[in-house]
Image (tube, rainbow, N blue to C red):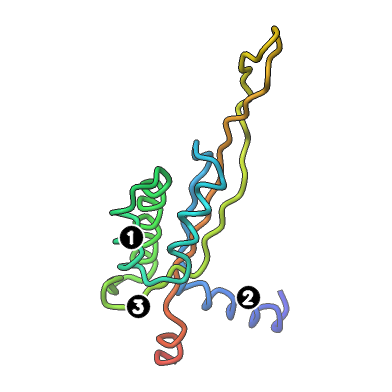
């Protein structure tokens, strides 16, 4: 590896130290319903987002709550000696993608059958320090 590539790789690696990622795969909830819950916490501080998800009545909020707790734990293991409560962590990115669908047949009038699709999704959640806090650290 050349010197220029090494410097760029070190810079990318240093930028990834403040970021923690958590993934959910094949959640049996439709992507549309999951996106509605994901939109409520996007860009919020972690403590506030946890409170919103914990007391939400939506079906998709429980898996998102567990995923956010997992992302916080990943961040704490990556940054040893620091607690998530001491730093201002923010849900910087949350992405909901469609996964495979289970196809089932539903009885319809006159002997027909309609196809029912039970949808599922993948969720990627990225937790990062607040932008103003990163500037203060540097």
Quarter-wise, where is residue 71 in the image?
bottom left
Percent across and percent down for residue 85 are 26, 72
Disc 2 versus disc 1: nearer the observer = 1
Percent across and percent down for residue 60 are 43, 46
Residue denoted by label 2 = 9
Residue in front for this viewpoint, 40 or 27: 40
Q: CA distance from mark 3 to mark 2?
A: 26 Å
Instruction: Please report whichever mark, 3 or 2, sits nearer to the chain's N-terminal start.
Output: 2
Residue denoted by label 3 = 88
Instruction: Please report whichever mark, 3 or 1, sits nearer to the chain's N-terminal start.
Output: 1
With respect to residue 135, does 113 lie above or below?
above
Q: CA distance from mark 3 to mark 1?
A: 17 Å
Element type at marker 1?
helix
With respect to residue 55, does 109 lie above or below?
above
Percent across and percent down for residue 112 are 71, 12
Identify which residue is drawn at 36% across, 53% down.
Answer: 65
Residue in front for this viewpoint, 79 or 88: 88
**Total marks drawn?**
3
Element type at marker 3?
loop
Percent across and percent down for residue 107 are 62, 13
* Labels 2 & 1 near each other (Cβ < 8 A): no
Q: CA distance from mark 2 to mark 1?
A: 37 Å
Instruction: Please report whichever mark, 2 or 1, sits nearer to the chain's N-terminal start.
Output: 2
Callout 2: 10 Å neighbours few (<14), some, many (20+)?
A: few
* Left or right relative to 129: residue 85: left
């Amino acid at each position: 590896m050349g010197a220029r590539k090494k410097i760029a790789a070190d810079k990318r690696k240093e930028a990834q130290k403040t970021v923690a990622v958590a993934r959910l795969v094949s959640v049996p909830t439709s992507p549309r319903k999951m996106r509605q819950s994901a939109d409520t916490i996007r860009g919020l501080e972690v403590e506030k987002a946890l409170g919103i998800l914990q007391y939400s009545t939506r079906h998709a909020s429980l898996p998102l709550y567990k995923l956010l707790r997992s992302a916080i734990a990943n961040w704490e293991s990556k940054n040893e000696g620091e607690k998530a409560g001491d730093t201002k962590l923010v849900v910087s990115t949350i992405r909901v993608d469609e996964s495979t669908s289970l196809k089932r047949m539903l009885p319809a009038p006159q002997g027909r059958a309609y196809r029912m699709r039970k949808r599922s999704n993948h969720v990627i959640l990225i937790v990062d320090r607040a932008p103003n806090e990163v500037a203060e650290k540097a």
